[in-house]
Image: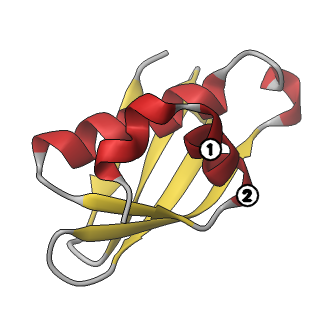
Amino acid sequence: MEIQNKNDGKRGAFYIEDGGKEIALMHYIFSGPGKMIIDHTEVNDEYAGKGLGLQLVKAGVAYARENHIKILPLCPFAKKIFDITPAFADVLF
């Protein structure tokens, strides 16, 4: 299971598929140059508790660092991860 990213320049998602079925998703919206908002994260109930949501947030942080983007985590799950992970502070706005 590998994390994939798709976006159209305005919005996008990091997602994980298993057997061709999407099992986890973190949706984001670009908010002007160099900014993105994480607005939704979900994991299929069958895969809950396996750390997939955390993996998606980590992928978003890596993407932000590579592309010099700041993140606003509006999604409650993503916000919690940012709150307990001081190492992600460099990408917050």
Q: Residue at x 12, y 40 (%)?
A: 66
From the viewer's perspective, tell me whether residue 41 is left or right of residue 15: right
> Which is nearer the eye, 43 or 62?
62
Q: Residue 83 shows which numbered tag?
A: 1
Residue 4 location (% of width, % of height): 36, 35
The C terminus is located in which quarter? Answer: bottom left
Within the image, what quadrant is residue 2 found in? top left
First reached walking from the N terminus: tag 1 or tag 2 = 2
Left or right of 71 on screen, residue 42? right
Q: Which residue extends farthest right?
A: 45
Q: What residue is drawn where x is 20% and y is 58%?
A: 69
Please say if 5 is above or below 3: below
Could you tell me which residue is drawn at 48 percent across and 33 percent down? 86
Q: Is residue 76 above or below residue 35?
A: above
Residue 41's x, y, as percent?
A: 65, 51
At label 2, the amino acid type is: Pro
Most foreground residue, 5 or 31: 31
Report the residue marked by disc 2.
76
Residues marked 1 and 2 touching at CB (< 8 Å): no
Amino acid type of the residue that numbered disc 1 sits on in the rendered structure = Asp
Visible residue check, residue 60: no
Give the SS element for disc 1: helix
